[in-house]
Image: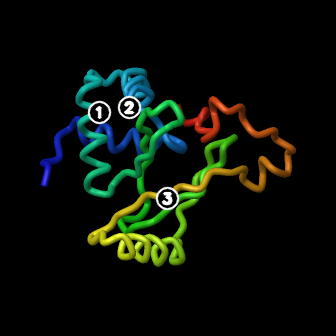
Amino acid sequence: MKRNTWQREAVRAALTSAEGFVSAQGLHSSLHATGSPIGLATVYRALADLAGTGEADSLQSPEGESLYRACSTDLHHHHLICRNCGLTVEIEADAVETWAQAVAAQNGFTQAAHVVDVFGLCASCSALGVEPPDAADAAGLRHAR
């Protein structure tokens, strides 16, 4: 287990206060705005460690950049993510779990793992008649960057 340094705690606190998913660079900028001297490489390492221990969720933006969010549970889960506002809801998906294990077994795989995130428009954005983002922003994480 990684020891808790002041840098890791600073990253954890900043991630907890961030809304939605955020990039390492975005989190680094917010830390610097509050006067923290923490380096960008340290932020990347701390986020990777937090994701590895289940304390942070991680996904990739359409551009391939890793984005992070403080995780509210350490149990395996999936996300519904609004493509417009970035609202994220943690969900269980028993049917996905069953399907993933069955497909893995049918193909001779064992110890299968998976990541499933579902992108769409939340009820509020849908009610506002928000147009879907363009193809370059297909995952709608523009507010999380």
N-terminal of the two: label 1 or label 3? 1
**The N terminus, quarter of image:** bottom left
Q: Which quadrant of the figure has residue 65?
A: top left
- Secondary structure at numbered mark 1: helix
Point 39% across, 75% down: residue: 106
Asked whether the beta carbons under mark 1 and mark 2 sit within 8 Å of each other, the answer is yes
Q: Is residue 126 left or right of residue 140?
A: right
The numbered disc on residue 99 is: none
Q: Is residue 3 left or right of residue 27?
A: left
**With respect to residue 59, does 112 lie above or below?**
below
Label 2 crowd (10 A; few <14 / some 14-19 / many >=20):
many
N-terminal of the two: label 1 or label 2? 2
Q: Residue furthest front?
A: 107
The numbered disc on residue 116 is: 3
User: Please, what is the three-letter code of the amino acid marked with disc 3?
Assistant: Val
Label 3 crowd (10 A; few <14 / some 14-19 / many >=20):
few
Q: Position of residue 75 (x, y in %)?
A: 38, 69
- Secondary structure at numbered mark 2: helix
The numbered disc on residue 24 is: 2
Q: Is residue 105 left or right of residue 98?
A: left
Q: Which quadrant of the figure has residue 13?
A: top left
In 3D space, how far apart are the residues under numbered discs 1 and 2 (Cα atoms)? 6 Å
User: Please, what is the three-letter code of the amino acid marked with disc 1?
Assistant: Tyr
- Secondary structure at numbered mark 3: loop
